[in-house]
Amino acid sequence: AQSVAQPEDQVNVAEGNPLTVKCTYSVSGNPYLFWYVQYPNRGLQFLLKYITGDNLVKGSYGFEAEFNKSQTSFHLKKPSALVSDSALYFCAVRDAGGGADGLTFGKGTHLIIQP
Amino acid sequence: DSGVTQTPKHLITATGQRVTLRCSPRSGDLSVYWYQQSLDQGLQFLIQYYNGEERAKGNILERFSAQQFPDLHSELNLSSLELGDSALYFCASSVTRQGANTGELFFGEGSRLTVL
């Protein structure tokens, strides 16, 4: 079975500082990894994904994520946080060798950017 | 706008009742997924349909059922509702091809169900 852990319920960052939202995963095969963002009372919006290739993936709104196979991690990063980045962030995984297409999500991390 | 449409946006009903949630996937997407989001359980995968057929089942209760119609829209039926069924129900769609699916899911805005 596949799983995702987001160890922090909440991350607080001052505006302009770099941010990191942590994610670790567990799959039996190779992982396909995704980050989504959810604003209040809205659906999930896709940010970026890692399928294969370069371990550093760039996505929407200046976000990037680094895939680390040895640490089974896929942390979300941004060099300079904006107040508008405040939202709920979800990491998700799909087993590349599995039969199911659905994503398994972590419990989410609330990112709060303080002015 | 993800291109996935869900109705209704809000629904308030009583325990024991039955409701139907509707989802129209993005144009061209053959797969539809249903997720339940609640404060205590997070995002839980319920069920997936691909081109009209059930493809994968997650933590879906026996009181819940779903189907995907020939025009690819999907409905999630929730019956004998309990207070604990109050949640945000999301539909998502993706293009699913033969072999591994590398594509992301596109989510609708959700249907918020309140059971009183």
Image (cartoon, coloured by chain):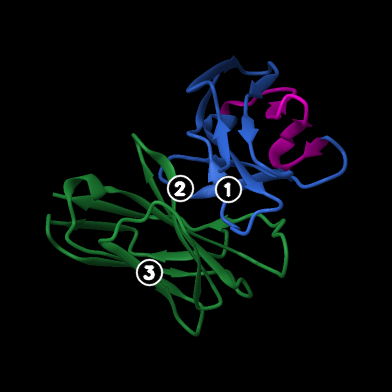
Chain ID, mark 3: B
Chain ID, mark 1: A
The quadrant in which residue A56 appears is top right
Q: How far from the left and from the top, in percent, is residue A93?
A: 62, 43
- Identify the magenta region: A56-83
Residue A53 versus residue A62 in the image, above or below: below
Q: Which chain is green?
A: B
Mark 1 vs mark 2: tell me if same chain: yes
Q: Is residue B25 left or right of residue B80?
A: right
Q: Secondary structure at mark 1?
A: strand
* Other-residue count near label 2 (Cα within 10 Å), few / some / many at <14 / 14–19 / ≥20: few
According to the picture, the residue beneath numbered tag 3 turns out to be B66
The quadrant in which residue B15 appears is bottom left
Q: Secondary structure at mark 3?
A: strand
* Other-residue count near label 1 (Cα within 10 Å), few / some / many at <14 / 14–19 / ≥20: many
Q: Is residue A41 left or right of residue B107?
A: left
On whether residue A70 falls in the magenta region, the answer is: yes
According to the picture, the residue beneath numbered tag 1 turns out to be A45
Q: Quadrant of the N terminus of chain B?
A: bottom right
Q: How many marks?
A: 3
On whether residue A112 falls in the magenta region, the answer is: no
Can residue A42 be spotted in the picture? yes
Residue type beneath disc 2: Arg
Camera-side mark, 3 or 1: 3
Marks 3/1: CA–CA distance: 24 Å
Marks 1/2: CA–CA distance: 9 Å
Q: Is residue A73 left or right of residue B75?
A: right
Residue A42 - label: 2
Q: Residue at x 31, y 56 (%)?
A: B61
